[in-house]
Image (cartoon, coloured by chain):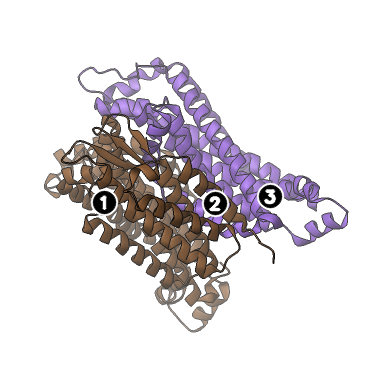
Amino acid sequence: MTIRFDKLGVVIAAIVAYAAFAAPFATFRANRIVPGEARSILEALPAMLGPLLLAVIVVAAVVALLKTPLILRLAASVVALAALALLIGVAGSFLTPEGNSFARISPASGFWLLIFAFTLLLADVLTRLNLSPWARIGVLVVAAAAIGMLLVSGSWNSLSILKEYANRADSFWAEGSKHVTLALGSLAAAVIAGLPLGILCHRVEKLRAGVLNVLNIIQTIPSIALFGLLIAPLGWVATHVPGAASLGIRGIGTAPAFVALFLYSLLPVVANTVVGLAGVPRAANDAARGMGMTDRQRLFGVEFPLAFPVILTGIRIVLVQNIGLATIAALIGGGGFGVFVFQGVGQTAMDLVLLGAVPTVALAFAAAIILDAVIEMTSTRRPEAQPA
Amino acid sequence: MKEAGVKAWVPSLLRLALVVLLIAFVSNPGWFEPLLKPLTESNAPAIYNQGSLLTLTLLHLRTVLIATVAATTVAVALAILVTRPAGVEFLPLSRSLVNIGQTFPPVAVLALAVPAVGFGEKPTLIALFLYGLLPIFENALTGLTTLPANVVEAARGAGMTGWQRLVKVELPLSAPIILGGIRLSVVISLATATIGSTVAARTLGEVIIAGLLSNNLAFVLQGGLIVAALAVLIYDGLSAIERYTARRMGQETA
């Protein structure tokens, strides 16, 4: 009987060995801005739990290291991730001195590396399982529900990032909804304006190069500059156009951020509409014409459905990009999760940075998974649209 | 015939004019002060006065260059690794990892890198590096996996080793596509590098942020326009190199 190693498993096992035995598991700080002291797994957890966590991690790493059935690898990665998620909360309450509300406990590099290693294992298993789009969304929902339950149950409440949250729970949700409104609203506006523009560019060849060049140049303007440059014209509109100010149009704040995100979103939407429509097979168009379809019928009945997956790809790019870019809106008073990031950078309070960054990354990640799944669904339902 | 010839010259002339304008602006911004003056309020300075625009432009370009070279090296090496028989089982995973990397907003990467490496250029380099990886990796992968089968077979038949095939056949043939990825990555990096100034990196973002903080539109405009002009010129330059290599490859394989 020979033992066979899994190539990726070797990498994972190496990371796990370093993270579990050489890197700190949690950081203890006397207050939120002083440098922290490292705590290893055995120091950070109560008597029985430390060795138990180490045992779980080592077993999971061995499962990863050897060539094992997929289902076993799946179980190992899920169990290890669940144990880490539960026990970091335990470490938080265990390390916080009784009745001390200034002390901050945060996960340290060892914890993050362990999470990374087992997420890598999980990602590899999920990639190899080749899940259907619905199953992928299902996995996302289950993961989100699990994290949501941990948050609601309060088992993470002793961790520093949630202490930051507790101090500003109201503004967190207000900024969060502003962030989502900015990202989704500008996307919706870009789709409403970009689709007709894309169709126009497809039909009128003379316009195409000009429009796409202008949109390309807009993309090269750095986001913070574009946000800033819109302050002046919007301020002018607010003071000179009656009724504009009451609509919320102002020089600083959400309006320039919204317009800037809209401008950035136009290129992917328009370009992908043009590419998608150009990729519609000639035969399909000829057949539709032969059936006596009008231009409009052909557009909505034939060209558009066939080009849809490509257009969706453009929308995916825009959505993920907008969720990230909306953080910059905070620089010009536009709100969003960026508020916490920039406040945190200013105060060198990393927990506050995390409070802004983690939800942003989670949103972008979820948006990417969902839209990728939708794209796959729409393009497999119409296999004839593939040779675009 | 003659008209077409004249028309073909227009873009090159525009480009040349842009280069001249850009060089004149960064080396002697004082000349342009009257143009920017109307944008300022209450006698604020119209030209950035807390550092030389030329130095900032060069530092900006240096940051982008270092990050792009690093991203290109890693992305191409990774693409080569996962297209060899020994690394092929990493292919799907590496693709999803690089994709996930792209969902991290640059501001978040910057802010999170600060406690690890401190303020300044380093967190910016990390963010630009991560952001530059995806386009280059995707394109390198496309280039290396869509080589004409008969060419690869011929190379194998000629007795070339794996290494020789890679260096003499596969890489040169996929060079134009890889260059396309580098071009995308550079343009993204040029704009993203400005955000680095929120964590005290010395880039042209400094000018823009100074403008935002002191409500000075002239600063915002000059910072933004220099970056945009650099991006347009570099994009054009790299496109030209790409066309040149593509033409050479076309001739050599014909």
Q: Is residue A179 above or below residue B21?
A: below
- Dot 2 crowding, Cα within 10 Å, few <14, some 14–19, many 20+: many
Residue A342 at x, y percent in the picture:
28, 36
Same chain for labels 2 and 3? Say yes or no. no
Mark 3–mark 1 Cα distance, whole angstroms, equals 50 Å
Quadrant in the rendering for residue A296: bottom left
In the rendered structure, the colour chosen for chain A is brown
Q: Which residue is mark 3?
A: B174
> Mark 1: which secondary structure?
loop
Which chain does the numbered disc 1 sit on?
A
Residue at 54%, 51% (x, y): give it. A13
Label 3 crowd bin: few (<14), some (14–19), many (20+), radius 10 Å = many
Name the kind of residue labelled 1 in the image: Trp
Classify mark 1: residues with Cα within 10 Å, few (<14), some (14-19) or many (20+): many
User: Which color has been applied to chain B in this rendered view?
Assistant: purple
> Tag 3: residue type?
Ser
Query: Is A61 left or right of A172, judged from the image as shown?
Result: right
Q: Chain of mark 2?
A: A
Pointer 2 and pointer 1 on the same chain: yes
Q: Which residue is mark 1?
A: A156
Q: Nearer the viewer, residue A176 or B22?
A: A176
Q: Secondary structure at mark 2?
A: helix
**Quarter of the rendering occupied by the C terminus of chain A:** bottom right
> Three-letter amino acid code at disc 2?
Ala
